[in-house]
Image (cartoon, coloured by chain):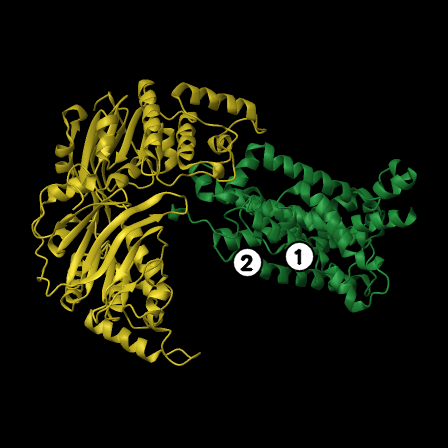
Chain colours: A green, B yellow
Amino acid sequence: MGFLVIFIQKVIGQGIGILYGALGEILTEKSGNLNLGIPGMMYMGGIAGLIGAFLYENNTAQPNGLVGVIISFLCAFLCAALGGLIYSILTITLRANQNVTGLALTTFGVGFGNFFGGSLSKLAGGVGQISVAVTGAAFKTPVPGLSKLGVIGQAFFSYGFLTYLAIILAILLSFFLNKTRKGLNLRAVGESPSTADAAGIHVTAYRYLATCIGGGLSGLGGLYFVMEYSGGTWTNNGFGDRGWLAIALVIFALWKPVNAIWGSLLFGGLYILYLYIPGLSRSTQEIFKALPYVVTIVVLIITSLRKEREHQPPASLGRAYFREER
Amino acid sequence: MNENNAIELKNITKRFGQVVANDKVCLSLKKGEILSILGENGSGKTTLMNMISGIYYPDEGQILIHGKEVTIRSPKDSFDLGIGMIHQHFKLVDVLTAAENIILGLPGKEILDRKAVNDKINELTGKYGFDLDPDQKIYRMSVSQKQTVEIVKMLYRGVDILILDEPTAVLTPQEADRLFAVLRNMKKAGHSIIIITHKLNEVLSLSDRVAVLRKGQYIGTIETKDATEESLTEMMVGKKVSLNIERPDPVNPKERLNVKGLTCISREGVKTLSNASFTANSGEILGIAGVAGSGQRELLEAIAGLVPSAEGSISYYPPEGGEKELTSMTAAEIARIGVRLSFVPEDRLGMGLVGAMDMTDNMMLRSYRKGRPFFADRKAPKGLAERLIAELEIATPGTSVPVRKLSGGNVQKVLVGREISLAPAVMLVAYPVRGLDIHSSYTIYHLLNEQKKQGTAVVCVGEDLDVLMELCDRILVMCGGEISGIVDGRTATKEEIGKLMMKTGGTQG
């Protein structure tokens, strides 16, 4: 039983960060923007949240956990949203190529994270010395009461609020896309911007907002990794390739936020499967770590074969919209 | 100013560069009537309507809606005035349902009340006699269902003036009848309707009045009850204009291409070309006339090996004798068996040339198979490009400038020049002078005549009857995917060809 509980905890620990990234990317892609900068923006969110908490705790005699959480949450969201804004200006206003811009942003974001991570370590007095104990603890506060419920409590209620927020956000995003007028308009923008434009929808505004908010959401994935998964420390490149897993998860989830919830758990499970297979060498571990990508490719093949329109990416994904072409 | 007019246009003029698309057009739509706007392709019907629906802005003239002068700068302005236009290409989002498309972009309660929306749609469809399931996804619909969604979308938004651009072009006759029934119901309910068309039978059966345009000029409006197919055809095609294009007599014409019963079926399952039979002779220009979309494109592309044919045969008789069967061959196979077939498509920078590449590279598209294996020969194509620039007076800074930077006339010279350089035995050209100025047009006529003199069988699809009648030895007329007749270019009258285009007279010849 204990073994299973630990497995579940690890799976969720891996999955939630990816889920945030995937939700941000789903929102972005629904507007027709293929933002491959998500992996970089998750780094940006993570380091910004850490810097915010660090500066707050270092400059306050009696740091308050809640204030620390709010500061780092806002810093992470806004910094990653800034990445989304850079992407939007380049691709929507200046009509730069979306793939090139996204990949550049990922390179930039990873460098941004590592650079400021290094600076922060120096400020703190050396590698591994960054301490945001109060904020970190606040992020890790489990659900009061429920987490004490024995095995169930440990398996499902022993996580900080970011875990539950991710699941709530996925459900809210699904509701927004399918049940509200603005969600309908956004889907139309991503499918056929000229149609949306003719219907009086402000295509540019929708694309900017979706990309920036989507960027902010993905930044929370970085924050989750830094605060809850790593307990408030920074290691260069510590986040690894989880950002790319998030983008793979978008495809795997067929652009549906609710699918992304269980998809993130599956990906998380596959990602740590190697820990549970005895007798693996370092190199064979990597094969197991690649499993989520293999699953994504299989899903891609199956959906391409079935050709169902509901399971395809937004039709105008990756394309800039020129009004003059109407 | 007339209060009874839903729309009144006064002296509307619109130019695109040097081309005058609409020249001082005056037109009125009465409240509660169906007005047909009739004209050939390129007569300016759609341009005129696009100015009412806010896609273009007129250079001169006034637009009055319900007696008030208005300025329409965007589709939204037009919409706010209660005008809705249904284009040939529908503006619908495929993965959304009919209802979602209908309410797209409308204000209202933030959380969608699908039931209320569906109820309102069902009320509208019941009132006018549409057949529509609000929850059906667009991509699962037939073309006629999609059109229904577009019309209901307009009604849902309270449009009272409806403009339809060739609404029946994509419909089966039964679907067209159903559409007309709905339009009559709408008229009864007080809506004013304009339908753009070039089908005479529709004009006569549906509309109250007909306005005719020809080459951007407004010819006149007549009551439908006073009109006949003959009088309308005459208004549409007009009298013959002399252009003084040279036409040498064919020298020793021999059968070069024999097409029998050629039939093409599009991916959507529509018959785009049915049972086409004709011959093309060496030393002769065979013109193809017809309103756009009558199957000309499919005919040329099927011969060139670009689209598969469902039935029929294509035989080629080389100048050196013998017979070769081209049926169901791809363009590459045709080239491999040594048939010198040139094709100048209507989409010059899409199918004919690569816009971003320079002249030399574009020449190589036809010659890359030559030269040593692996390494391409660039010298010969460069020489050809230089020769074309000199011989055809192509205005370009040099062979290394991307061809899309050239003007339309020069682009066409590059394309035609390349195709001629193959010394073709058969040359297929589609709309060779579309968008070209007079001088370039005559250069192209001259090039086609040169080919003819050298014994090439030239097949030329055109839209200007005056040009075809002076350039071509024989004219094949198409209508609705069928060949409605083949006439002699020297003796045929414009009325005769016009009737064949409209299928109002004549028999297979």
Q: At which x and y percent is residue B64?
A: 26, 29
Residue A207 horizontal side relative to residue A216, left or right:
left
Q: Is residue B322 left or right of residue B449?
A: right
- The answer to which quarter of the image holds residue B29 is top left
For the N terminus of chain B, which image quadrant?
A: top left
Which is more N-terminal, label 1 or label 2? 2
Q: Which residue is tagged 1?
A: A244
Residue at image position (44%, 40%) is: A195
Amino acid bearing label 1: Trp
User: Relative to the observer, which residue lies in front, B46 or B131?
Assistant: B131
Query: Residue drawn 36% across and 66% down?
Result: B333
Instruction: Indicate the secondary structure of the residue bearing disc 1.
Output: helix
Tell me the residue that label 2 is attached to: A99
Which quarter of the figure has residue A130? bottom right
- Could you say where residue A59 lies in the image, as x and y percent from the top left? 79, 52
B357 to A35, vertically: above or below: below
- Chain containing mark 2: A
Residue count near mark 2 (Cα–Cα under 10 Å), binned few <14, some 14–19, many ≥20:
some
Query: Along the line of sight, which residue is nearer the eye, B140 or A86?
Result: B140
Chain letter of the residue carrying label 1:
A
Q: Going by the picture, which residue comes out furthest to the front? A: B322
Residues tagged by mark 2 and mark 1 found on one chain of the structure: yes
Q: In this orientation, which residue lies closer to the viewer: B455 or B221? A: B455
